Image (spheres, rainbow, N blue to C red):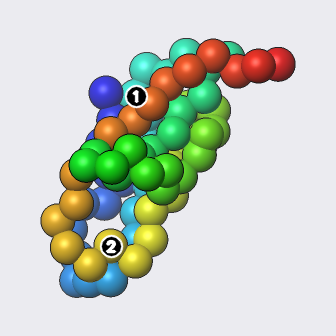
Amino acid sequence: MYRPERAWGYAPHTTNVLVHDFEPGILYELRMNDTNYPVSGPLSGDIGLFVRDVMETTWYNVLARQSRE
């Protein structure tokens, strides 16, 4: 599960999407929901996925995958 750190405010909006109950060794990537275009990451779950310049209500999805290390 993930949620924005701060989900309100006037545009342009900037926030971190936080991954709850992240797993060590897994990388998380924030993507635009309709195109799967990468927005932030891939990063470990202990770091917020940074989003900036959001001008309207936007849907995202998070891809989780094994780190290659």
In this view of the protein, which residue sits in the foreground, 61 or 14?
A: 61
Mark 1 touching mark 2, by CB under 8 A?
no
Q: Is residue 35 left or right of residue 59?
A: right
Q: Is residue 24 above or below residue 18?
A: above
Residue located at (31% from left, 60% from top) = 6
Residue located beneath label 2 in the image: 54
Badge nearest the viewer, 1 or 2? 2
In this view of the protein, which residue sits in the foreground, 39 or 13?
A: 39
Give the image location of residue 14, x and y in percent: 40, 71
Residue located at (40% from left, 77% from top) = 53
The answer, for residue 58, to whether it is visible in the render is yes
Instruction: Name the image quarter holding residue 3.
Output: top left
Instruction: Name the image quarter holding residue 66.
Output: top right
Give the image location of residue 4, x and y in percent: 32, 51
Earlier in the chain: of badge 1 and badge 2, it is: 1
Q: Is residue 31 above or below residue 23?
A: below
Residue type at numbered disc 1: His
Residue located at (40% from left, 35% from top) = 62
**What mark, if any, has residue 52 been given in the picture?**
none
Q: Label 1, label 2: how many angstroms apart (C-alpha)?
A: 22 Å
Give the image location of residue 36, x and y in percent: 38, 44
Q: Farthest residue in the right direction?
A: 69
Mark 1 nearby-residue class (10 Å; few <14, some 14–19, many ≥20): few
Residue located beneath label 1 in the image: 20
Mark 1, secondary structure of its residue? loop
Q: Is residue 48 left or right of residue 34?
A: right
The quadrant of the rendering that contains the N terminus is top left
Mark 2 nearby-residue class (10 Å; few <14, some 14–19, many ≥20): few
Give the image location of residue 57, x and y in percent: 17, 65
Residue located at (33% from left, 49% from top) = 35
